[in-house]
Amino acid sequence: MGSGIFSIGASALQNAQLGLATTSHNISNASTAGYNRQRIVQVANAATLTGSGYVGRGAHVSNIERIYSSYLVAQVNVAQSSVSKLESYSTAISQLSSVLLDDSAGLSSALEGFFTGVQQVNSAPSSLTTRQTMVSAANTLTARFQSLSSLVSSQYQSINGQVQGYVNSINSYSEQIATLNKQIIVAESSSNQIPNDLYDQRDQLVAELNKLIGVKTTTNSNGSYNVFFGNGQQLVVGTKVSSLAAIASSDDPSRLTVGIVNPSATVELPESVITGGSLGGILQYRSETLDTVANELGRTAASLALTFNAQHALGQDLLGNIKDDSSFVADFFKVTTPTVIANTNNPLGSAEVTAEFSPASYSSDGTFYTNLTTSDYRLTSDGSSLTLTRLSDNVSWSAADIPALNTAIETSSQGSQGFTLSSTGTFPAGSSYLIQPTRLAAQSVEVNSAIAADVRQIAVAAPIRASVGTSNTGTATITAGSVVPGYSAPASGSPVTLTYSSSNGGELTGFSSYPVTVTANGVTSTINSGAVPYTTGATISFAGMSFTISGTPKNGDTFVIAKNTNGVSDNRNSLLLAQLQSAKTMAGNTASYSTIYAQLVSSVGNKGGEVQTILTAQTTFLSEAQSARDSVSGVNLDEEAIKLLEYQQSYQAAAKMLEIASKLFDSLLSIG
């Protein structure tokens, strides 16, 4: 009997000791990241059958259990991955948004200042001072474009650094998880017990890894984890690790992306498979927002340069020069051509491809505009044909060669994309090119150095001037005249003289062989040669020149169209330049410079607000998920204090039991 009580007391004492040790371990790890509360699992020993029935033999601790919910932990990891992604996105976009909105750093005030300079030239076209003011305002505007572009460039560089840092950390966590997998396999196989603390450490590493990249885990029969990301790409399988690498993108070597290291080569991964975590957030920000901002700033810069240059080219400078004169400077702004990047994996001997901006289009209302978009494009070859794909919406065009492709684009329902392609060489199957029409335009736009050096070369005046004959007897008047792209101005000393004849109800002659377009009462007609019927108020156009004659001419009255000599006080072209500020110069003649920039600022601001709103909600969800997990797995010090007292009393009772058993045993021995 004494022996049975002694063994029961000894087991009770041992159970109490394990309970005290486990509770003490919980208390000491209450603040340890990733620690899950533990408890002893106590099981009754098999009873002994006697004549009086089964007599209990005490209890033993079968194992020390980790209080853990894989479901709740998975919820926390999903929420944490989302929060980390949104935090990295929000941090980057808030910096960009604040600069775009800032009057002293944004584009709106600089655009307004530039066109104010143009208006000042309108008021004093012959003044070198106002012309210099206009050039200074133009320099301020281009510097603002370049400053904003520098901010974008610095973010691109920062993202490259972050990608490298995140990849290094991911590899480090993966190695540590694999090491713990090995330790767990050894520990479980040698003891057939779960090494709880190793499990906690591994789960904490998975949680930290999940902050960097969204991952999922599966458990093997030996207790080890497999860790996957994206659509099943392996990071850890048991004790084996697949390393990631930050590599230059084959499409664009200036940007780092993620590759997975294989024994034979490093394979570049599509960025779409990098989901969740800080890495997923920063890559999404780059492709979704930063690329769009860079392209939109470039589109605005290129459109400003192309449309302003197109109108400027229709003018006459203070020295009397017009288009086709050797000293005439047609372009007020200079801007780089579209960027074409050959894929680094292109077959040897692949063609060299270049791109040029298309000339600004000219609308029926006299406005120059561009058809540039904010998208990048990809040109690919299958060996027999070429395909250009607009990456923003995957609209594509195909043709046998580059000239045919340019034509296919121009004549399609989508119309011109604002640039044309050219090439030298052949296109083997598999060759690919990334085309960025506007990506670098904002950083390169500048005032033409020739104009900056001599402001007299700003084409403020119109190249022609129409006037009534000095001996006219009628009351008819003629407007000063205007020109459109491709005009042919009369040579100096050789004006075009139109003569009114009262025959045939009144007509004008003297157009020579020029086709003439007449617009009267909203109806336009073309007369290829001969006399033009006279209608008061009609707009007459020929050789790219237009004017309106109104009133009642007399037989023999003349109207003279000549090159604009001594037009130093003429501001007709600068008035048209000033109108570009509010004209629909962008997006296929649908929006102005300011409208497009305002839309950009609004879009970035709205996206930043959207991300912040989602981040707030996800942070709340994460907090709730963590609370739910901690309510199950976390250490409650009050609860552990109660357990300490409970196990202390159990320990004391067990000790008393042993004391009694010892006395009983001594009594039995004394009887013998």
Image (cartoon, rainbow, N blue to C red):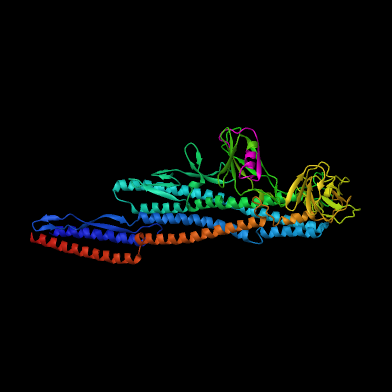
Q: Is residue 596 left or right of residue 520?
A: left
Q: Quadrant of residue 253?
A: top right
Query: Can residue 423 be found in the magenta stretch?
Result: yes
Q: Position of residue 468 (x, y in %)?
A: 87, 53
Q: Nearer the viewer, residue 160 or 122?
A: 122
Q: Quick check: can you spot residue 29?
A: no
The residue positioned farthest toward the right in the image shown? 471
On screen, residue 631 above or below 532? below
On screen, residue 259 above or below 610? above
Q: Position of residue 259 (x, y in %)?
A: 50, 43
Q: Nearer the viewer, residue 115 or 629?
A: 115
Q: Is residue 138 left or right of residue 63?
A: right
Q: Residue at x 12, y 55 (%)?
A: 49
Q: Quadrant of the C terminus?
A: bottom left
Q: Residue at x 15, y 63 (%)?
A: 663
The magenta segment:
405-431
Q: Quadrant of residue 61?
A: bottom left
Q: Position of residue 574 (x, y in %)?
A: 77, 55
Q: Residue at x 32, y 65 (%)?
A: 639
Q: Is residue 626 left or right of residue 111?
A: left
Q: Position of residue 476 (x, y in %)?
A: 85, 55
Q: Nearer the viewer, residue 371 or 121?
A: 371
Q: Quick check: can you spot residue 219?
A: yes
